[in-house]
Image (cartoon, grey):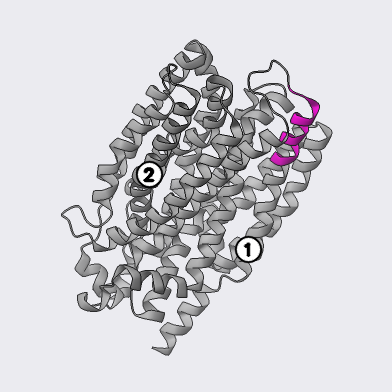
Amino acid sequence: MSNQKQQEQSLSLIRKIGYGVGDAGSNFCWTFIASFIMIYCTNTLGISAAVIGTLMMISKVLDGITDVFMGRIIDATHSKMGKARFWYFVSSFPVAIFTFVLFNVPGSFSENTKYAYIFIVYTLIGAVFYTMNNIAYSTLTALCTKNPKDRVQMGSYRFIFAAVGILFLSFCTSGLLEHFGGGQKGWTAVSFIYSIICLALLLVPVFAVHELPEEELREAAGLDKKRDELGFFQGIALLLKNKYFLLILALYLVKYMGSGLTSGLGIYFATYQLGNASLLGTLSLAGILPAAVALPFVPALTSKLGMSKAVMASNIVGVLTCVPVVVGGLTGNFMLVLIGMALRAVASAPQTGAMNAIIAETDEYSNLKFGHRMTGMIYSCSSVGIKIGTGLGTALCGFILDLGGFDGMAQTQTARAVATINWSYLLAVIVPMLLAAVLFYFMKVEEDNKRMRAEK
């Protein structure tokens, strides 16, 4: 089958939606952890935010290593379910189970044993099971279709369902904890419910999408089996030579470190700066719903400007939209914060919708430049960036809280602690978009691919 015919094929709408549902399931694990693990540790277990932050940073080092290994494992897999779909399926169960386990630290444990328990379980989730699940999930984008528009749309549906999951978590978690009695009793009930929802949603893409036959993928890429096989260290060497892989990795780290900070500090910002923990849901809604509304227009925008240029321009606009967020946060004008967050969400839509397709272009760049397609390893950059970025952001939350003198067991917080939370949250909103705009200025992968195709 020619490359042109392959690209003309399109996935049905129901399959694209089914694929997107999986990211709602992912968020009932990872966003739940990123948003609430710190406040669970400080306000329920009564242990140090700084120590937890340090343990999370150590865990993320291990996490980054296993991501690349998992990408290589996917590339080397040949099963009846395909390369990525098999690993996505088998990892869905432990992802859900260990989410429940993490939020159920036995009260009889000593303080040091609690630290060890959290570190071990958090590392198992991040470095093993979520690594396996998320890299496989992202890789499916390149393995189930060769149509660039399909890939952008799959990224858009993925965001929409992720947004549904995040909004549910933001609006409902505090109320559910209170409904089930608060304290450890509340966390046990909520984490059990979320684990069940997580598993059910994660399994939907297993039945919704199927990988193209390997022969078809090889024919479309112009590869023969012998040429495409690489050793692990050869693959690492090629990844480090691929400038666009490194750029995408940096982009994910920047974006998700900011996301980890805003997610981790969001509950503290709503509770202590805004005076109402339930306002976290309103903040999340303002930061997500407008992006979901804008996403259907992203394919037309990227087709007109090119993916990289569209995303760079949107990030520049996004930096400007952060100004009302900062002004509103400093002056206590909550409505101004919401307006700014909504505008920022619209500006973020092109990057959200296009990133999976840009990674696929980076895989194509590897094929054209070096003669090797390394889909799994290249898609590992998204998981590396998401997890290390989010993990470092969450870890920084612990250091920030400790620096500001936050005491989770105190009835009221000092002015210094509240000011530290406020400033840190606001900076985490604006800085990532500024850095992303700079990084996308150098993202010329589409142009390079067109040039190399023409030369060949």
From this viewpoint, is residue 16 visible?
no
Pick whichever, 284 or 12, lies toward us: 284
For the magenta stretch, what is the residue range? 413-425
Give amino acid for label 2: Tyr
Which numbered dot is residue 165? none
Q: Residue furthest left?
A: 80
Answer yes or no: do the residues labelled 2 and 1 have beta carbons within 8 Å? no
Tell me the residue that label 1 is attached to: 312
> Marks 2/1: CA distance?
29 Å
Q: Residue 164's x, y, as percent?
A: 48, 35
Q: Quadrant of the N terminus?
A: bottom left
Of all residues, the one furthest to the bottom in this rendering is 455
Q: Which mark is residue 130?
A: 2
Estimate the x, y position of residue 17 in percent, counting from the top left: 37, 45
Using the rendered image of the protein, determine whether residue 99 is visible from the camera's viewpoint: yes
Outermost residue, right direction? 331
